[in-house]
Amino acid sequence: SGPISEYSACLDILEPLCFPDPPAGCSSAASLERPSSDLLVCLFCSESVPLLLKDTLLRHLVLDHKLVIADVQLIADLSKYLQYWKGRFLEQPLTEFCSVIKTNSTGPLEKQEDYFLLCDILPEDRILRERLQKQRLEEVLEQQQKERDDSSFHHLCMFCSEEFTGNRLSSLLNHMAREHSFSIGLPDNIVYCDEFLDTLQNKLDSLQCLYCEKTFRDKTTLKDHMRKKTHRRINANNHDYDRFYVINYLELGKTWEEVQSEDDRDLLDDGDENDWSDWRAHPVSVVCLFCDHESETMDQIYTHMKDTHRFDLHLLKTEHNLSFYQQVKLVNFIRRQIHQSRCYGCQEKFGSRADMLHHIVSKGHVMNLPEMSTWDQPQYYFPTYENDALLCALSDTDGDESDEMSHSEDVPVIAEDISNLQALKQSSILNQLLKN
């Protein structure tokens, strides 16, 4: 049982965790449409259909009125778009706005037909589409602000019984990411959050995996499946989720990666490349070692941990003369112990994180580190949380980086237990090869 338990402990150390992170979804105009009772009206007759049956109306326009609307999926509000053009077509003939497409142009005259194309090549159409897009973006941002100001938020964690109330969306998302390794993204990128959470909860209640979307016979089987298959995330290819992310409303028809890459190209093409006068550092989101508090700068998170939890990482670095890589291992070690509700000072295990934190404070273990051999191990080179911003800005001790790097070139970084190196060397096949 010894080797098995050691192997299990190693797997537990390397269990992937992640702070909330923006999803890698793509934008689709159809998926951004909220369920609506708005009717879509025909531009020429009394025909009308609900928004969900828009394909029926588009087919009607083509077959009965020979009108084709280009790039319908990029129109932010199709109902308002149709109402606008219905009014314009009453004022002036169709041919004043639309390009004419003649079919069978080389065939007999009686088989030739004229179709009309309405598209954004027409300046008036392009202006209309841009205005509708801007209006919807403003509506989404207004909705997001309402959710930020709303103190009536109330939701249970989808994976345990912990309750979050009073504008605690960020706390709930951080809790699910840290305690259950489940992330749907940063709160600042989420809109219609209650509906989003209810959608996910309904899927779980229906015994459906959130990632592969397979249905299982009971909750235990579903839970084991999501854990073993690392399916503790949503399916980025399911565009029904797109409307819950603000970034998908920035420019219709483009993925958020395309929007970002265009912004980067604009920066590269803009004026003097050596002029950094307008530089604004992108705010980071650094999470406290002990609670869900986030800060935008390293100084703020250090001050928070020192004032709130009496934990001084700078002091520990100085007292123990920690190199940069030792700081990395220490942070990953403490993150893992707290995630497992274990005191990192005395290694006592607790039933909940709250009990463990109370013990650390009451026993004065906040600044007590165990023997260096406990945490200065190769497996703690690997981040406990994949996107832990705290690791990216640890300060280095002068001269230690080069020494550590030169020393580490001869030391393999491996995650397995290598405590019995002598036995490994004696039994290694390399010894036989060298003798031969």
Image (cartoon, rainbow, N blue to C red):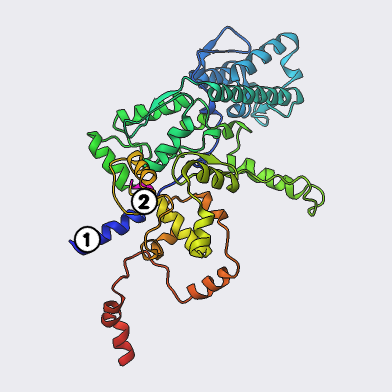
Magenta-highlighted residues: 337-341
Q: Give the residue pinned by disc 1.
A: 4
Name the magenta segment's main secondary structure: helix
Residue at 26% across, 35% down: 216
Residue 306 appearing in the image: yes
Q: Name which residue type carries label 2.
A: Gln
Q: Is residue 298 left or right of residue 177?
A: right
Residue at 58% across, 24% down: 145
> Which one is nearer the viewer's eye here, 257 or 72?
257
**Which quadrant holds the N terminus?**
bottom left
Residue at 33% across, 46% down: 341
Q: Residue furthest right?
A: 272
Mark 1 burial class by Cα count in 10 Å: few <14, some 14-19, many 20+:
few
Q: Give the residue pinned by disc 2.
A: 337
Q: Name which residue type carries label 1.
A: Ile
> Which one is nearer the viewer's eye here, 404 or 277?
404
Q: Is residue 350 above or below residue 327?
A: above
